[in-house]
Image (cartoon, grey):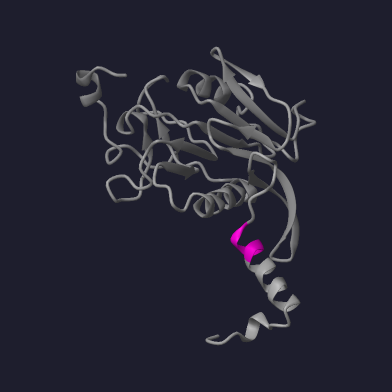
Amino acid sequence: MLPPDLKSALPTTEELPCSDDTPVDNEDQNYLPNVLLFLLELIWQNRNDWFFGVDMAVYHTTGISPKVPVVPDAFLSLGVERQKQGKSRRSYAVWEENEIVPVLTLEMVSHKPGGEYDEKLEIYTKLGVLYYIIYNPESWQRDRHQPFEVYKLVDGEYQLQLGEPYWMPEVGLGIGRYRAMVGGIDRELLGWYDQQGKRYQTAEERSRQLAQYLRSLGVDPDNLPGN
């Protein structure tokens, strides 16, 4: 916890840049984290004590300067407001969030390495992020790693965890990969899982299953009363 005099000297999120102005160079780096976000909004729709950021600057005081952020492809914080004072966040400053650091960060490796296995790992270690997930479906052999890796901070060091989907008791969710048809395209996605390893379904999947169930009852879901 920072002393009050030091905390008051730190810039606010209104004063800090809300982007590092680095363009996303991979479609999945934007799409897949948003799938996780939209799914989380279904799973935790009755909770207001979490925030999931996508490609958002995280400002902290454990680096070279509080004005230099780290920008995960996605991160999850627990014990914070869904909206800060009723407004959407421009960025995430740890000192404005009661010193709550993300419990989970996700980095997706593109064709060009971005320090996921060294520089960012060191940053998240100092910051104290409990779970660090690296998703590297295309270049894992080049980087001599696995396509999907979950690291847990144990005694100040990240340790590679085994099992997929991987259950995170501190988060109350598991995470792992699966394949699905999305917009007519078969693709690999990241999803949330319960403790029994059952995947939480997306809104599209739920709607499709409901339609199939209605058809099994002889009801045309496209011609329901009121449609």
Outermost right residue: 141
Q: Is residue 122 magenta?
A: no
Query: 22 or 158, which lies in front?
Result: 158
- Measuring from the top left, give residue 28's x and y in whole percent: 64, 49
| On screen, residue 124 above or below 108 | above
Query: What secondary structure prevails in the magenta region?
Result: helix
| On screen, residue 164 above or below 24 | above
- Measuring from the top left, give residue 205's x and y in whole percent: 66, 62
Outermost top residue: 155
Q: Residue at x 35, y 25 (%)?
A: 66
- Measuring from the top left, give residue 92's x and y in whole percent: 38, 37
Region rendered in magenta: 202-206
Q: Residue at x 43, y 47 (%)?
A: 47
Residue 138 quadrant: top right
| On screen, residue 26 above or below 60 | below
| On screen, residue 43 above or below 64 | below
Q: Residue at x 52, y 55 (%)?
A: 42
- Measuring from the top left, give residue 181's x and y in whole percent: 74, 60
Query: 214 or 159, which lies in front?
Result: 214
